[in-house]
Amino acid sequence: MARKIVTVGSATRRAIKQIFARLDYARLGPIYCDEGGDEFWAAKRGLCQRLGTTLASSLVVRLKPGGTSLYVGAGVAEIPPLAMEILDLGRRVIACNLRRREVQVLNRGCGGFPIRFQHQAAGAVKDRVDHLWLVSVLNDPERFPELSVLSYGRANPVTFNARKFLPQQRTVAKLVDHCLGRLTLPGLITTTVEEAVWVAEWCHRRGIPYRIDSRTFASPTVGDPICFMKIG
Ligand SMILES: C[S@@+](CC[C@H](N)C(=O)[O-])C[C@H]1O[C@@H](n2cnc3c(N)ncnc32)[C@H](O)[C@@H]1O
């Protein structure tokens, strides 16, 4: 009987190390930060590799070999779990990102390994998946400034712009509806505590049971607490 994989394999750890050593941090700097990109990556690159591998080790036991995952907003922090899914579990992964330049840098860094990022909106993905990765996307301050301050509990009631908030809320609800609609049940979602409310609301409306694992993992780039949700 085949043994169940319980941690990230050593060949995958070596691949992750090589990819992180190869990434062009000078080009990633202005993509992630308005200023101070060099300092940001000096502080974050090791964290992304280390915390990402810890998270990948927790994810590996929750996924079946041979399934499919949809990553919405996959960036540097997602390299370890993507590598684990593809190299250790032989899973298919659709890793979407709306920043064209970041996708180019990531794909160059992953050259020689079967890990590919796509410059594509997750809302256009038609495939069925058994795992959805949705981390620090629905509260992204760049795309959803009003929704983001509200989500993080930082909205100022004096200056909050409810008129700008409403279309952001509709866009996020549509994205959530599309991505969750791609998930086969029972399914797994890796998300953040702040974003879990969107998944919970989607499940409530449909009478679908869900369970949020109490353990959380700090996201290395944004600092949001990441959690696992089982739905269906
Ligand atoms: C704040 S960043 C978070 C990136 C990464 N998950 C992390 O934690 O470092 C948000 C990312 O989501 C991506 N994004 C936002 N909406 C998206 C969509 N509809 N489809 C694919 N990617 C999307 C953006 O391109 C960006 O890369």
Image (cartoon, rainbow, N blue to C red):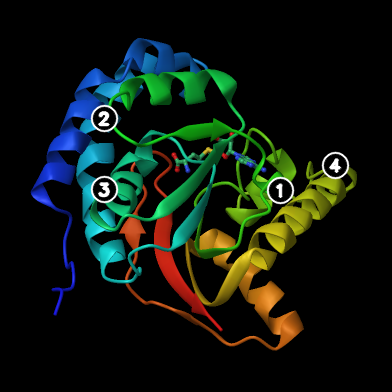
Question: Disc 3 designates what residue?
Answer: 87
- Kindly report the distance in space between the C-alpha atoms of the residues bearing marks 4 and 3: 43 Å
- Kindly report the distance in space between the C-alpha atoms of the residues bearing marks 4 and 1: 21 Å
Percent from the top left, x then y, of residue 114? 34, 36
Q: Is residue 33 visible?
A: no
Percent from the top left, x then y, of residue 26? 36, 10
Question: Disc 1 designates what residue?
Answer: 123
- Kindly report the distance in space between the C-alpha atoms of the residues bearing marks 2 and 3: 21 Å
Kind of residue sitting beneath label 1: Gly
- Seen as rendered, the residue at the extreme left is 10
Question: Disc 2 designates what residue?
Answer: 45
Vertical order, 221 against 19 (above or below): below
Question: Disc 1, ligand 1: is the CB inside 8 Å?
Answer: yes
Residue at 47%, 34% in the rendered image: 117
- Seen as rendered, the residue at the extreme front is 1
Circle nearer the N terminus (4, 2) = 2
